[in-house]
Image: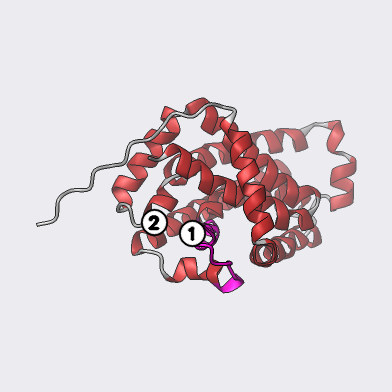
Amino acid sequence: MESPQNPPSYRKVPLSQIKSWLGHGWQMFHQTRNASMAYAGIFAMIGMVLLAGVVILDIAPMAFPLAGGFMLIGPAVLVGFFNAARLQAKERPARLADFFGGFRHSPPALWVLSMVCMFLFLIWLTDAAIVYSLYFGTVPVLSALEFFSSFGSGGKWLSFLLFSSFTGAVLAFLIFAVSAFAVPLIHSRRMELANAVGTSVHAVFGNFGVMMAWGIVLTLGVAGSILLFMPLFVVVFPVLAFASEQAYRDVCA
């Protein structure tokens, strides 16, 4: 009979640790630059196609929930970076295939958690679409140029963004608390799904201020690069992904 798994302890870290995480993320990105950019580039291309669809359909306000929604599925994508970091620690240069190898060798529990993230992402998009239809109806109302030129005028555009951002933030926080440390714990096979999720939630709330600040950094970095300059995503996302891996090592003993 197998003995039950004991959740690992977690450390409390200072707010200044975020700078160290970002520094580590940049260093790891520099070491795996080509493979990291190629891997992140795949998701950047998918994002560009989706944003182009939003622009073509003249529903420009939906670009914001679409970009923010990436934070809901991002944890599942991090597996590739965690695998690359593991290989780099063994002084083996990570290739693009090694990023995808993180998925091939992932335990079933990680696929379950990834499906939960995807399910919540679909809920988020559905809710955002419903809110959009309540504000603007079901027909195209503004092109991207018209929307951004009238953005500063406020009105229902600002109200839509604030309301949809609030609902998205709730889902994003749930996913962040559940998956911030559960994904690397499961990927490293330190524990199964239930214990990993419990440990992640305890670690996030145990470092609440630091983790909230880190979550804001992640959101601004990822969503900002998607909305402002998509090519920047292939640099920002790998840096933040490797930084998240270091955050896991610092927080989870």
Which residue, as the protein is rendered here, is positioned at the far front? 91
Q: Is 212 positioned to the left or the right of 22 in the image? A: left
Instruction: Say which of 174 and 37 sits in front.
Output: 37
Q: Are marks 2 and 1 in contact (CB under 8 Å)?
A: yes
Decide: is 148 above or below 111.
above
Query: Can you give x and y, in whole percent of width and height, for residue 138 in the image?
Result: 70, 53
> Mark 1, residues whose alpha carbon is within 10 Å: few (<14), some, or many (≥20)?
some
Decide: is 43 above or below 123.
below
Query: Can you give x and y, in whole percent of width and height, for residue 107 in the image?
Result: 36, 63
Decide: is 56 above or below 10.
below
Q: Which residues are magenta?
A: 76-97
Q: Is 93 positioned to the left or the right of 226 in the image? A: left
Magenta residues, dominant SS class = helix
Image quarter hosting the C terminus = top left
The color scheme shown is secondary structure
Residue drawn at x 64%, y 46% as measured from the top left: 68
Residue 205: image tag: none
- How many circles with numbers are drawn on the protein? 2
Image quarter hosting the N terminus = bottom left
Residue drawn at x 84%, y 52% as measured from the top left: 144
Which residue, as the protein is rendered here, is positioned at the far left? 1
Query: Can you give x and y, in whole percent of width and height, for residue 173 in the image?
Result: 51, 38
Disc 1: which residue:
86
Q: What amino acid does circle 2 point to?
A: Ser
SS under mark 1: helix
Disc 2: which residue:
188
Q: Quadrant of residue 140?
A: bottom right
Determine if the magenta segment contains residue 122: no
SS under mark 2: loop
Q: What amino acid does circle 1 point to?
A: Arg
Q: Is 2 positioned to the left or the right of 104 in the image? A: left
Residue drawn at x 40%, y 65% as measured from the top left: 106
